[in-house]
Image: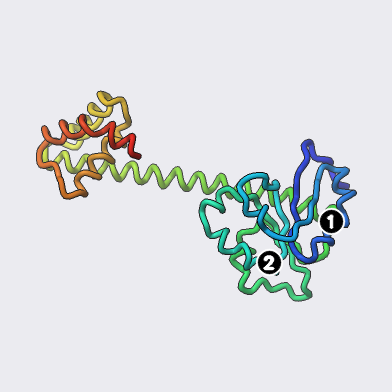
């Protein structure tokens, strides 16, 4: 038995065997799944008006594999499942493409089978995005801590201060400039990596107070 979805779900089918899915369209429509067959992948790769999920033949993987390696398209593309009804399913050169999928069909599908793989695929896609976001957040925190650590070290050396005093120096400037400590640290690190390095604490303070807002706007 197929449960009816609370809201309609658009599913685009691509490839020469799309009729194996479309033949179940009437049954699936009754349960909130709207299938459409397409002869090319333009809509799949478009950022706008894309379906919630697509089902794609492995035979056309070469057409879109390069696009999926583009991080901008990968970020905005909807999830997809891959089908291959060959007796001995072998994705071959399309392995990378198949690996990016959220599910696979290796047998001719039934309405129940389509619904199950679609729902599981959507859940997997959500989990992948959540993991990716957590990874990006961790990476950003690592970069932030790196900048603060380097900036603190610079001030310790040039200002002959303790680590705590150096950090308080950064925090005071951040408070006065109404920005984050990490913003001050990044601005200082970028300067010290350039040819116009600051040589003492007073020049660091004056330069940061005069340039921090400019650098923030540029970022």
Residue farthest to the bottom? 88
**Residue drawn at (75%, 64%) of the image:** 15
**Residue drawn at (56%, 63%) of the image:** 66
Q: Which residue is label 1 attached to?
A: 22
Query: Where does the image place residue 100, in percent across and percent down from the top left?
Result: 61, 59
In terms of image quadrants, where is residue 161? top left
Query: Where does the image place residue 206, in percent across and percent down from the top left?
Result: 15, 31
| Residue 7's disc number | none
Left or right of residue 163: residue 213: right
- Going from the N terminus, do you reach mark 2 or mark 1 first? 1
**Residue drawn at (23%, 40%) of the image:** 188
Front-most of 55 and 217? 217
Query: Where does the image place residue 53, in percent across and percent down from the top left?
Result: 70, 50
Note whether 130 is above or below 211 in the view shown: below
Mark 2, Cα crowd under 10 Å, few <14 / some 14-19 / many 20+, is some
Front-most of 122 and 205? 205
Query: Where does the image place residue 69, in percent across and percent down from the top left?
Result: 53, 60
Note whether 42 is above or below 212 in the view shown: below
- Element assignment for label 2: helix
**Residue drawn at (50%, 44%) of the image:** 134
Mark 1, Cα crowd under 10 Å, few <14 / some 14-19 / many 20+, is some
Note whether 171 is above or below 49 in the view shown: above
- Element assignment for label 1: helix
Left or right of residue 21: residue 80: left
Front-most of 40 and 33? 40
Quarter of the picture containing the C terminus is top left
- Report the Cα–Cα distance between label 2 and label 1: 18 Å
Q: Which residue is label 2 attached to?
A: 60
């Amino acid at each position: 038995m197929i449960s009816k979805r609370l809201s309609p779900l658009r599913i685009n089918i691509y490839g020469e065997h799309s009729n194996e899915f479309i033949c179940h369209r009437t049954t699936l429509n009754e349960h909130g799944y709207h299938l459409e067959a397409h002869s090319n992948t333009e809509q799949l790769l478009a950022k706008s008006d894309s379906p919630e999920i697509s089902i794609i033949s492995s035979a056309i993987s070469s057409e879109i594999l390069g696009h999926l390696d583009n991080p901008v398209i990968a970020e905005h593309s909807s999830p997809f499942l891959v089908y291959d009804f060959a007796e001995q399913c072998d994705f071959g050169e399309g392995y990378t493409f198949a690996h990016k999928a959220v599910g696979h069909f290796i047998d001719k599908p039934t309405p129940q089978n389509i619904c199950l793989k679609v729902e599981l695929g959507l859940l997997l896609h959500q989990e992948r995005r959540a993991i990716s976001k957590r990874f990006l957040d961790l990476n950003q925190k690592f970069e932030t801590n790196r900048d603060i650590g380097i900036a603190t070290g610079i001030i310790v050396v040039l200002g002959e201060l303790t680590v705590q005093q150096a950090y308080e120096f950064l925090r005071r400037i951040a408070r006065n400039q109404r920005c984050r400590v990490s913003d001050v640290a990044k601005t200082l690190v970028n300067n010290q990596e350039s040819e116009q390095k600051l040589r003492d604490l007073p020049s660091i303070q004056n330069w940061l107070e005069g340039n921090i807002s400019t650098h923030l706007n540029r970022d």
